[in-house]
Image (cartoon, rainbow, N blue to C red):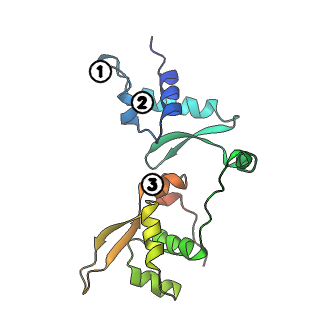
Amino acid sequence: MTDHKSIIEAALFIATKPLTIDNLLKLFPELEQPERSVIRTSLKQLAEDYTDRGIELVEVASGYRFQTKATLNSWLQRLQAERAPRYSRALLETLAIITYRQPITRGEIESIRGISVSTDIIKKLQDYNWIRVLAHRETPGRPALYGTTREFLNYFSLKNLNDLPTLSM
């Protein structure tokens, strides 16, 4: 009998990106392919197996992945040769506005911030693949409407935008 859980666990360990249930189904030959419910059960069991360990199985926007527990970051940082990137306040403010108000134009972002948004900030957010142009508004100048990407959700360990903390005003 095929040990689905072990195969899924091994695949998640070697994967360089999150894996979907469809990706996991492709691991098995067509005649031995388990039901989706078997894959989900195996994922649930794996998540339980790792509850008391230093890594955890999480579901993000693009699928499932193993990651270190956030509570261990202060110890693990000592192993990292390079420092984590430091993001400017302007970049973080712009990203937060786009995240909570999407789809949104650059002019609307500037109106909320009360200051112009540097082209470099928009470019940097696009280079990180955290935002993208969703469409163009049908107004004079056809301004770009920005929104977040799956990569943004993955980076911040979110399944979807509903997982964001609520804004207190």
- Helix, strand or loop for disc 2: helix
Q: Is residue 30 above or below residue 18?
A: above
Q: Is residue 9 above or below residue 135?
A: above
Percent of width and height locating residue 61: 45, 50
Q: Residue at x 52, y 40 (%)?
A: 65
Circles 2 and 1: CB distance less than 8 Å? no
Disc 3 crowd, CA 10 A, few/some/many (<14, 14-19, 20+): some
Residue 135 in the figure: left or right of residue 17: left
- Helix, strand or loop for disc 1: helix
Q: Residue at x 59, y 67 (%)?
A: 87
Q: Earlier in the sequence, mark 1 or mark 3?
A: 1
Q: Is residue 101 visible?
A: no
Percent of width and height locating residue 103: 38, 72
Q: Which residue is mark 2?
A: 37
Q: Which mark is residue 30?
A: 1
Q: CA distance from mark 2 to mark 3?
A: 27 Å
Identify the residue at the far front of this view.
Answer: 81
Q: Quadrant of the C terminus?
A: bottom right
Q: Is residue 143 visible?
A: yes
- Amino acid type indicated by mark 3: Glu
Percent of width and height locating residue 91: 54, 72
Q: CA distance from mark 1 to mark 3?
A: 30 Å
Q: Earlier in the sequence, mark 2 or mark 3?
A: 2
Identify the residue at the far top of this view.
Answer: 1
Disc 1 crowd, CA 10 A, few/some/many (<14, 14-19, 20+): few
Q: Which residue is mark 3?
A: 151
- Amino acid type indicated by mark 1: Glu
- Amino acid type indicated by mark 2: Ser
Q: CA distance from mark 2 to mark 1?
A: 16 Å
Residue 112 in the figure: left or right of residue 35: right
